[in-house]
Image: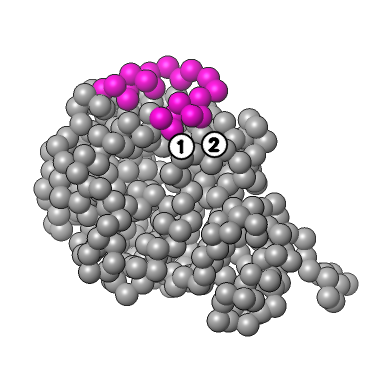
Amino acid sequence: MSGPLPGVRPATPAGIDPDRLASWLAGHLPWPGPLGAVTLLAGGRSNLTYRVEWGDRPLVLRRPPLGHVLATAHDMAREHRVLTALGPTPVPVPRTGGLCEDPGVLGAPFYVMELADGIALRGDADLAPFGPRAAGRIAYALVDTLATLHAVDAEACGLGGFGRPEGFMARQVRRWRRQWDDSRTREVPGADRLNDRLAAGCPPSVPGRLVHGDFKLDNVLLDSADPGRVTAVLDWEMATLGDPLADLGMFCMYWDGFGGLDRSPVASPGALPGWPRTADLVRRYARHHGDGLEHLDWYVAFAFYKIAAILEGIHCRAAAGLTVGDESADVADAVPVLVERGHAVLDGLR
């Protein structure tokens, strides 16, 4: 005989109190329970994501990581708000359930949403089955989805005051320097100098658009029957009104910026045979929005710096024993390489 005994709830992962969670869900959701298994889907790298069996309806719960929450990061109310606002727009997002801002329930704020259908491509091995035609359809579906997001009327969907676009990138450079300093447990050669170079060359402000903040292949779900169609965009914790080229620069950095790293934490499609190059993605995006692309290298370099700072924060939490799961393994080794690659972009060498 296998499986849990009748009436015995399966063991739950760290960050979840099943009794308190069951009570909160029963009081705040329109869908009947009871609470079943809770499974960690992603942990350690950023916010913690769990699958929650609630009656016959699978849900997803998002909460901040355990410990060392950086200022302004991991804002559950913010993520819940933007997902709810985007629900009626052409941007594909999961339907939200409830938001809990009482840390007495799970030790931190959290929200729940319906489990979206689709497949995630998280590593290079997941990309191997796709030939050049399918790879191109996936790549261009991602670019078109990003362009669709940047075309959303933030005022019309209730997000008009969601950020301060004026001076956005200059503030971002200062913010991520502070985040780096807050997570500093070692010296990473070139990190501070990269920040100095970015600050000195910051492009002028552009009209603000709604931006995701961490748009990449493994933050979307694809239709399992037609992977060239995006079914949901996930992980909106960094969304704001800001510079759309920050999103494009981040997407380009992820597309090939981790290529060649041992045990890379993300896929690098642009470094693989048969997948479109970064320049192809930029040309596709330019069909929708073409302004400011002459500054794109700066935005890509900033993306390298920002992700290096995030990974350094994960390294800090892992060293303190405050990560869940094994997704934080090996990120420390990637940080100096990302800093070097940020310099290389500014030097015109990538």
Residue 137 sits inside the magenta stretch: no
Label 2 near label 1: C-beta < 8 Å? Answer: yes
Q: Residues within 10 Å of mark 1 (few under 14, many from 20)?
A: many
Q: Name the residue under label 1.
A: 310
Residue 183 sits inside the magenta stretch: yes
User: x%, y% of residue 253?
Assistant: 33, 40
Vertical side of 142 occupied by 307: above or below = above
Residue type, mark 1 in image? Ile
Q: Mark 2 points at which residue?
A: 314
Q: In which quarter of the image is residue 181?
A: top left
Vertical side of 342 occupied by 217: above or below = below
Tell me how many marks there are: 2
Q: How far apart are marks 1 and 2 (CA)?
A: 6 Å
* Mark linked to residue 179: none
User: x%, y% of residue 70?
Assistant: 49, 39
Q: In which quarter of the image is the C terminus?
A: top left
The local secondary structure at tag 2 comes to helix
- What residue range appears in magenta? 178-197
Q: Is the magenta stretch mostly helix, strand or loop?
A: helix
User: x%, y% of residue 267?
Assistant: 44, 46
Q: Quadrant of residue 139?
A: bottom left
Q: Residues within 10 Å of mark 2 (few under 14, many from 20)?
A: many
Residue at 57% x, 31% y: name it: 316
The local secondary structure at tag 1 comes to helix
Left or right: where does residue 243 sit relative to residue 263? Answer: left
**Residue 235 appears in view:** yes
Q: Nearer the viewer, residue 107 or 247?
A: 107
